[in-house]
Image: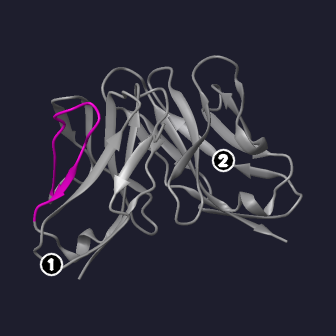
Amino acid sequence: NAGVTQTPKFQVLKTGQSMTLQCAQDMNHEYMSWYRQDPGMGLRLIHYSVGAGITDQGEVPNGYNVSRSTTEDFPLRLLSAAPSQTSVYFCASSRQDTYGYTFGSGTRLTVV
Amino acid sequence: AQSVTQLDSHVSVSEGTPVLLRCNYSSSYSPSLFWYVQHPNKGLQLLLKYTSAATLVKGINGFEAEFKKSETSFHLTKPSAHMSDAAEYFCVVSEGTGGFKTIFGAGTRLFVKA
């Protein structure tokens, strides 16, 4: 049972490049979410999904897109990377919002 | 609207002494409450959760938390700190009224001195 798998673990992008952060879970969880973590700012919600085909914006959605075509996968797309998107990104999943979340190990992204 | 406040951004204790990390919440409903731990350069791990059963909740690694509705608090405690407890701890509230209602606190960094 792998839990929540995030790839890649590290990435360096140039300003203006696009990329997709992958997130997959094998627990048949309906709820999935993406957070970014920056020093002194805690965890900020980017986008979330309450089931396949359903996504919504969180606190800091600008510059990011998501889709949820399957229950297992919830990729996060950076459309045109900016230095302000340098951060650690975490994906999480849960059976329901009140069950507690399982987190991936994170992707450390640097935009130069 | 719900909210969660972690009252200390940093807590420092000596090894072998008690740990207290404070969390207050606000919710119009009967919320579920959680504590997560994040060790350096790692993901978050669920420590314990309260979901309207016993008000004293026991978690992993000797941690426990007590839900006090009258004080709207959910403080995390451990009788004796270990060096391996040094990490960041997040208090989380979820109203459970449907949809996505999970709110994270800002975190408390725990330092453990030898």
Question: Which residue reaches farthest top?
Answer: B53
Q: CA distance from mark 1 to mark 2?
A: 41 Å
> At which x and y percent is residue A47?
25, 45
Q: Chain of mark 2?
A: B
In the image, farthest residue toward the right: B16
The residue lying at 16 percent from left, 34 percent from top is: A69
Is residue B28 left or right of B54 when viewed as pictured? left
> Could you say which is closer to the camera, residue B30 or residue B35?
B35
Magenta stretch, residue numbers: A64-79
Q: Looking at the picture, does residue A85 appear above or below residue A74? A: below
Disc 1 element: loop
Q: Pointers 1 and 2 in contact (CB under 8 A)? A: no
Percent of width and height locating residue B46: 57, 41
| Relative depth, front residue between A103 and A40 | A103
Where residue A93 sits: x, y (%)? 39, 37
Q: Which residue is mark 2?
A: B22
Query: Dot 1 corresponds to which residue?
Result: A15
Other residues around mark 2 within 10 Å, as few (<14) / some (14–19) / many (≥20): some
Main SS, magenta region, reads loop
| Residue B60, quarter of picture | top right
